[in-house]
Image: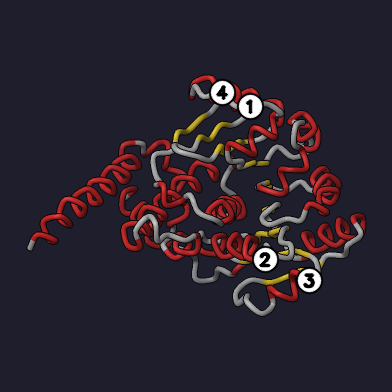
């Protein structure tokens, strides 16, 4: 009996939390209205290429799970196809684990790898790139050579962002032919990217993030408590979903997959970043309610993406 008394308030808190999150969407219909496109009825004649093809470039020995989490999250967010491009030693391991996900073997030579990616992207109708999950440091030259040559919506994360550490203007130059780029650093990665310690004051941090977004010509998802999304034009979004259980290995890779899955379905960059961040946090909240925050792992978030989508669809109707 005493145990029941202890559990009942927790149940109430959880219900209040979800009510608030869905109220947030319902009260900001204008800001979330674009997400309703995800829930439109699919035509009977639809095929997988109608819903986009994400190419994930990443992975290294010891980091094989990162691109796989990204790929699975992209599929769960509605992408029609996902391919992971990596080196032979990574693909050999992936082939034992993948089911719905395809693979592309990349040569070690940078010029040959760029050629392979460009040919594959054209032949297989790739509509978005996710670059960086688990990426080996030895592939930094590949990212610098590739980014200026592909005009595709791109999510640049983790190892991919390391290619431009300390030089946002260099990323801006690389993006000069491609306005549809998103980066998603956590605060440590962002400090390395801008080349200085971050301010503790949130207003000052927002100003720095906005300045960096303009210099780098990119939408920035600054991950952390109340994840911040800012684009080069000054649009911003303070996220309200998510919980401390998301502070666990691989959750950033899941976010990369969710955002790139929306990019592949031709959502604009700011929309894809905003919606992806919110849905990622909501799926994390649903997972934590079931698994507890300490028991939460990144793959749980992927499992709860469909439930998060159902909740949001209901709030928008």
Tag 3 near tag 4, CB within 8 Å: no
Rendering coords of residue 138 (x, y %): 83, 54
Q: Which residue is mark 2?
A: 64
> In the displayed structure, would residue 304 be above or below residue 143?
below
Q: Give the side of residue 90 with respect to residue 248, left or right.
A: right
Q: Which residue is mark 4?
A: 199
Lower sequence index among marks 1 and 3: 3
Inter-mark Cα distance, 3 to 4? 41 Å
Inter-mark Cα distance, 4 to 1? 7 Å
> In the displayed structure, would residue 178 be above or below residue 122?
above
At 50% across and 54% down in the image, what residue appears?
Answer: 248
Q: Secondary structure at mark 3?
A: helix
Lower sequence index among marks 2 and 3: 2
In the image as oriented, which residue stretches furthest toward the front? 2
Q: Which mark is residue 89?
A: 3
Q: Give the side of residue 258 with respect to residue 172, left or right.
A: left
Inter-mark Cα distance, 2 to 4? 34 Å
> In the displayed structure, would residue 251 be above or below residue 233?
below
Lower sequence index among marks 3 and 4: 3
Q: Secondary structure at mark 4?
A: loop
Q: Give the side of residue 93 with respect to residue 262, left or right.
A: right
At 45% across and 59% down in the image, what residue appears?
Answer: 301
Lower sequence index among marks 1 and 2: 2
Q: Nearer the viewer, mark 1 or mark 3?
A: 1
């Amino acid at each position: 009996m005493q145990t029941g008394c202890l559990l009942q308030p927790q149940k109430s808190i959880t219900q209040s939390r979800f009510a608030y999150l869905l109220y947030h969407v319902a009260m900001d219909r204008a800001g979330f209205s674009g997400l309703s496109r995800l829930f439109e009825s699919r035509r009977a004649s639809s095929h997988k290429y109608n819903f986009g093809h994400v190419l994930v470039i990443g992975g290294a020995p010891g980091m094989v799970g990162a691109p796989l989490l990204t790929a699975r999250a992209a599929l769960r967010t509605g992408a029609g196809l996902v391919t992971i491009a990596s080196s032979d030693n990574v693909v050999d391991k992936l082939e034992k684990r993948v089911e719905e996900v395809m693979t592309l073997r990349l040569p070690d030579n940078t010029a040959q790898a760029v050629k392979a990616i460009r040919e594959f992207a054209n032949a297989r109708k790739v509509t978005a790139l996710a670059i960086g999950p688990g990426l080996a440091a030895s592939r930094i030259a590949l990212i610098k050579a590739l980014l200026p040559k592909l005009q595709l919506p791109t999510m640049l994360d983790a190892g991919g962002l390391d290619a431009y550490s300390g030089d946002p203007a260099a990323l801006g130059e690389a993006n000069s032919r491609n306005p549809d780029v998103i980066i998603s650093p956590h605060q440590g990665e962002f400090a390395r990217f801008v080349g200085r310690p971050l301010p503790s004051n949130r207003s000052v941090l927002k100003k720095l993030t906005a300045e960096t977004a303009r210099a780098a010509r990119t939408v920035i998802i600054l991950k952390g408590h109340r994840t911040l999304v800012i684009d080069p034009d000054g649009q911003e979004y303070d996220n309200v979903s998510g919980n401390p259980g998301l502070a666990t290995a691989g959750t950033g890779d899941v976010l990369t997959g969710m955002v790139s899955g929306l990019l592949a379905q031709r959502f604009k960059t700011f929309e894809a970043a905003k919606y992806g961040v919110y849905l990622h946090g909501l799926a994390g909240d649903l997972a934590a309610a079931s698994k507890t925050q300490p028991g939460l792992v990144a793959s749980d978030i992927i499992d709860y993406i469909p439930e998060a989508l159902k909740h949001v669809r209901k709030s928008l109707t």
